[in-house]
């Protein structure tokens, strides 16, 4: 059977989730039809009405009752209360919000249920995505370390505004078939990363003077600045802060990306994903999330409101 695979596009966890699922599909003689990347925010009206003509698998993105296979770890995955109420987990449908990554969830699920040995490179992939997606680094310096192949691939993915579907498909195939260090040496990934590294070094120099500290929250307006790798930079310069907000351009939307400092968590933490979902129709996890806005002015206006909420939970 061939599955159309929907996945979180432009995301290391999304690509790795599709890659690990693809490995296990092939083990049982199945394959794929199309790879369909989705990005947040997903149009909820379109998602509800979506007709899946072919058997479909969905990973690291919103739940859909028509999916033959579905894995996710986001607490904001259900957009319809009826869907959530009727959801029944089984061997092909799994939600675990405690899993650091969706890729890790898929890997652990199939290795446990199938009770088989898999290549070490697949285990390494799942382990690395667990670290990067849930920010399980020992320090902010580790989070900004560009030497490990997994970090090179992940950072490169983050830097590409819109990667062609064909290239995302190629990346998924590489991750499903070879070690991370081999995938990172692929010409287009290596060349893309080297360009990224140059921009990264320039960004680190610029960001220091662009950050605005408001209580226990650091704000970065990265619009039009050609900055990359900024997710952890606020905590590099302000290690005692609890939260950060970054304004980024994503497609037609102006997105506020909100995060919690992994190395200085608040004792009274905010649930960022749920707050952004209820207030703005965004979503995410307890410690990280995002919300889209149609205009830059609207997004900047809401920075103050989100800041007030975060500082109440500092």
Image (tube, rainbow, N blue to C red):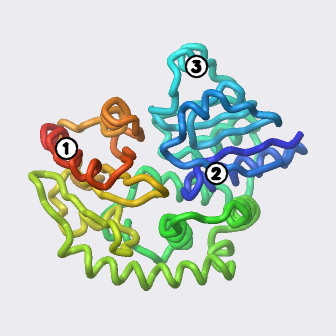
Instruction: Give the spatial CA distance, label 3 vs label 2.
Output: 22 Å
**Which callout, 1 or 2, points at the residue further toward the start of the chain?**
2
Q: Is residue 79 left or right of residue 145?
A: right
**Could you say where residue 244 lies in the image, as x and y percent from the top left?**
25, 54
In which quadrant is the C terminus drawn?
top left
Towards the viewer: 71 or 291: 291
- The quarter holding residue 168 reads bottom right
**Could you say where residue 138 lies in the image, as x and y percent from the top left?**
34, 61
Where is mark 2, residue-wise?
A: 37
Where is mark 1, residue-wise?
A: 266
Q: Is residue 154 left or right of residue 275?
A: right
Q: Is residue 158 left or right of residue 88?
A: left
Q: Is residue 260 at least partly visible in the picture?
A: no
Secondary element type, mark 3: helix
Q: Is residue 29 left or right of residue 313?
A: right
Secondary element type, mark 1: loop
């Amino acid at each position: 059977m061939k599955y159309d695979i929907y996945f979180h596009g432009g995301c290391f966890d999304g690509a790795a989730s599709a890659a690990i699922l693809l490995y296990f599909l092939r083990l049982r003689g199945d394959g794929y039809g199309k790879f369909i990347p989705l990005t947040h925010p997903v149009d909820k009206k379109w998602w509800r009405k979506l007709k899946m003509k072919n058997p479909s698998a969905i990973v690291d993105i919103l739940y859909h009752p028509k999916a033959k296979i579905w894995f996710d770890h986001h607490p904001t995955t259900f957009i319809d209360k009826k869907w959530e109420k009727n959801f029944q987990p089984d061997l092909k449908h799994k939600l675990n919000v405690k899993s650091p990554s969706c890729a890790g969830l898929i890997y652990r699920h199939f290795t446990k249920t199938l009770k088989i040995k898999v290549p070490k490179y697949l285990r390494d992939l799942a382990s690395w995505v667990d670290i990067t997606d849930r920010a399980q680094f020992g320090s902010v310096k580790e989070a900004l370390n560009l030497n490990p192949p997994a970090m090179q691939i992940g950072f490169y993915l983050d830097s590409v505004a819109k990667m062609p579907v064909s290239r995302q498909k190629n990346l998924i195939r590489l991750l499903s078939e070879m070690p991370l260090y081999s995938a990172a040496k692929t010409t287009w990934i290596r060349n893309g990363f080297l360009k990224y590294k140059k921009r990264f070094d320039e960004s680190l120099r610029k960001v220091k003077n662009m950050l605005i500290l408001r209580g226990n929250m650091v704000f970065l307006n990265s619009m039009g600045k050609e900055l990359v790798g900024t997710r952890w930079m606020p905590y590099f310069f302000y290690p005692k802060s609890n939260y950060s907000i970054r304004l980024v351009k994503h497609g037609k939307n102006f997105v506020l990306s909100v995060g919690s400092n992994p190395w200085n968590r608040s004792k009274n933490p905010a649930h960022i994903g749920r707050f952004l979902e209820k207030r703005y129709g965004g979503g995410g996890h307890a410690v990280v999330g995002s919300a889209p806005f149609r205009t830059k002015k609207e997004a900047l206006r809401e920075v103050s409101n989100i800041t007030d909420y975060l500082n109440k939970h500092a």
